[in-house]
Image (cartoon, rainbow, N blue to C red):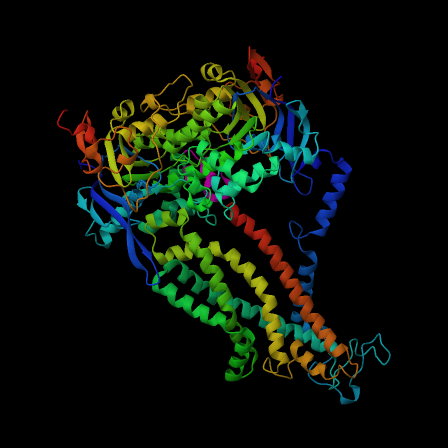
Amino acid sequence: MNGSAANASPSRAAALTLAWRYASFRSEGFPVLPVLIIVVFVLTALFANVLAPHNPEVGTLGDRFHPPAWQDGGTGEHLLGTDHLGRDVLSRLIFGARVSLVVGFMAVIFAGILGTVLGILSGYLGGWVDQVIMRITDAWLALPALTFAIFLAAIVGPSAMNIVIILAAVYWTRYARVVRGEVLSLKEREFVRLAIVAGCSKRTIMRRHILPNVLNSTIVLATLMLGVVIVTEASLSFLGVGVPPPQPAWGLMLADGKKGLMAGYWWLTVLPGTCIMLLVLAANLLGDWLRVKLDPQLRQL
Amino acid sequence: MAGPVLEALQLTKHFPVRRGLLARQTAVVRAVDGISFTIERGRTLGLVGESGCGKTTTAKLVLLLETPTSGLLRFDGRDLQGLDAAMHREYRRSVQAVFQDPFASLNPRMRVDRIIAEPLVTNERLTGGEVAKRVAHLLELVGLPERSADLFPHEFSGGQRQRIAIARALALSPKLVVLDEPVSALDVSIRAQILNLLTDLQAQLGLSYFFIAHDLAAVAHMSHTIAVMYLGRIVEIGDAATIAAAPKHPYTQALFSAALPSHPDEKREEIIVAGEVPSPLAPPAGCRFHPRCPRVMERCSREEPRLLPEARRQVACHLYTGIGR
Amino acid sequence: MKLLEVRNLSTHYVSSRGTRVTRAVDDVSLAVDEGETLGIVGESGSGKTTLALSLLRLLPPAARNVGGEIWFEGEDLLRISNAEMRRVRGKRIAMILQDPLASLNPLFTVGDQVAEPIRVHEGASRGSAWDRARELLRAVRIAAPEARVREYPHQLSGGMRQRVVGAIAISCGPRLLIADEPTTSLDLTIQAQYLRLLRDLQRDHGLAMIFITHNLGIVAKMCGHVAVMYAGRLVEAGPVARIFSSPAHPYTQALLESIPRMSDGRQRLTAIDGQPPDPVALPPGCAFHPRCPKVMDRCRVEAPPEFRVAEAQVSRCWLSG
């Protein structure tokens, strides 16, 4: 109820508006920080060769367990310290970004394509096609993602491409579900009916009318799934069934580093962990903002 | 070619209602139950009725969005039942539609020229240039500026979108256009523009219209013939002016008396019909209107009246089919 | 003294950045006598719904009253406290909205919902409130009220739901009922039943009513006075018979001429060019001037004030000055 607004002084109203605006960039403000973080990571991954000061895969045993430069015992040579094999942590983080992002993006795209296509077919064609695809989706979704991924990894063996395929195979179902729901309601919209009346084939309708109108949801979902996929990839690496060593991956760094926790070598786990957290957080916040930005427009249409 | 554009004979559509785990058919929704009507070349048939009367289903049947359970649809004298693919396509080109919601009728992600051209590119082999020319011509026909072709639907108002929808419906030079509540979602001051446009186009292009609306004055204004539907049946059908001036069926009378006046001095006899519209799942026995009819007789609960000529139209009511006429 | 007197009411919508101001209701004045029916007519963007919400202080957070007074039974509703306003809503002024499904809570029985205002405003016990609820359902002509009180909204038809909404509205004996497009979602014959019910209720309880609608037919049938709104301003007001017979404002004239009449046959309608303006980007001067068949140079620059055209008729047009 708005009774008090009539009596609020103009300055108080202005102050409240300002505070609300800054506190919630969600509603209107472009999420500058998350996008910046993602851009930084992407650039790091792209220019890893140039940026990394050392070879991430080879280290000098004599330089083991150096702490980061700002602590006692640290050197300017290794800004973020070294690991148990004397490898430079900073370089490994930089190349690790490449793995996480490449695997993450590719998995999300593959899962997206597969899930969207199946979702559209299922939603628009209905009948037994819908039944079959939905049963498969239900069964798939019932499997715990991580366990399933480990199972698949054990079967096909570790390699970067395999991990991408495995992640896509595990996560396509989320897309299928969401897209099917959208398609079911789009199907009833009058412009689809008019396309049928105009004589368009089912294939044409799915391609020309249904697909472009579910893309918004697919994009939002993809951004939100990026975080999940990255964490899963890191978990797989952590458990030793991810991207095989000596290729650096953040999850793998966590696994190696946990041995050193007791000895106080905190930088071996905290640093890769922080990277994972930052990237996932940034992806989630971006996805959140995209959802708010893109959805209301859909509603208005 | 003389003869009516479209004929419906005992058109029926029943929807099965499935309940239970095994989706057994437990009941039937008699959405459209044996209706017959004719749409003449270059003229408008108006269909009125309230919710559950079956007018939307009838529109879908005419547009081949649903297949009839029984009954015939004849287009240009040809039976639509045993249509092969080629005839089917021919029908689609000749019968188009304009729906109620101007916001949902246009694909928000397509430009206006592609929207209007879609029926053309789907059904004919034309070069890009020919298509563009036709689109420009259609835009002019509906009174929209040429540059509209490059814009998206959301850049237009409701009335303008409805014009785009009309342009699209005319792309293939159809013979019949189904208009399902074409102006109900528009502002009052815009409705007259669109109704005038439709009237002009009918005169210019010799179009036939199947006009469905709940605004009785609009239907009476636009139609040559009016059909009144109740619970899947036609209860009165005939010349629009004749029926509007003196409706004979008690339901039609109630409907027209319920229509809002256009001036406070317009006094109408108030015929208030009691009760609610029954569900099409279980229509009353005998005359479907009898439980609510202010002039019900004993015969009405037993025997369903047939459509018979009376006072220059057809009425399905025992008041006019008795011994003492 | 009039029952309700609105003086120079203005309500604006402010965008969240404070940049865009939409003058949804701009300097509107009107009045309603006891037992009288006023129709407020307007199209989309006219501000009629915002006006209705302003009367009951039910505006969304983005809207603010920026001026004017609403005098109801001797008090300015804009100056009283929130607590006092709560005592007015439902008890002394009631409101009916367009969509009965949205107006009723799907999780509570009909009885609970009709009884609620009685319990809130009069502190009645559940038992006696439910007794009153049954009586009210009978008063709004719902068959078998004893059974209905225990049912849920989804079990009722649209027409019945709208009657339940009506029962809730009159439950505490309000002096004024505001009905915002109450019959738009109803079938014709159901609408006829409902309008007759409203008229009888009005007569039996001495209710004053404000009908907010885009449908001039409802105004012709139900109202004694009418106020026409366009782009947030009141452009014409007066007794219904007079306004329908000799409208002074070009918008009212054009509107009346453009509506299809049953007796007209298939004559071409007189249409109004253009479309209603976007409230965010109003034209300068008189908001109707781009569409006005009688536009003059002055209209493009200066917005006209209200002129008194006849005994009780006002028109906001330079031609009436």
Question: In the image, B290: left or right of C117?
Answer: left
> Which residue appears at 57% of the width and 78% of the height?
A160
In this view of the protein, which residue sits in the foreground, C273 or B45?
Answer: B45
Pinpoint residue B9: horizontal percent, then vertical percent. 19, 42
> Which residue appears at 52% of the width and 69% of the height?
A171
Quadrant location, the N terminus of chain A = top right
Q: Which residues are magenta?
A: B143-164
Question: In the image, B185: left or right of C70?
Answer: left
Viewer can see residue B316: no
Secondary structure, magenta segment, majority class: helix
| Rendered image quadrant of residue C313 | top right
In this view of the protein, which residue sits in the foreground, C114 or B143?
Answer: C114
> Which residue appears at 59% of the width and 63% of the height?
A224
Identity of the residue furthest to the right in this view: A72
Identity of the residue furthest to the top in this view: C311
Is residue A201 positioned above or below A131 on the image?
Answer: above
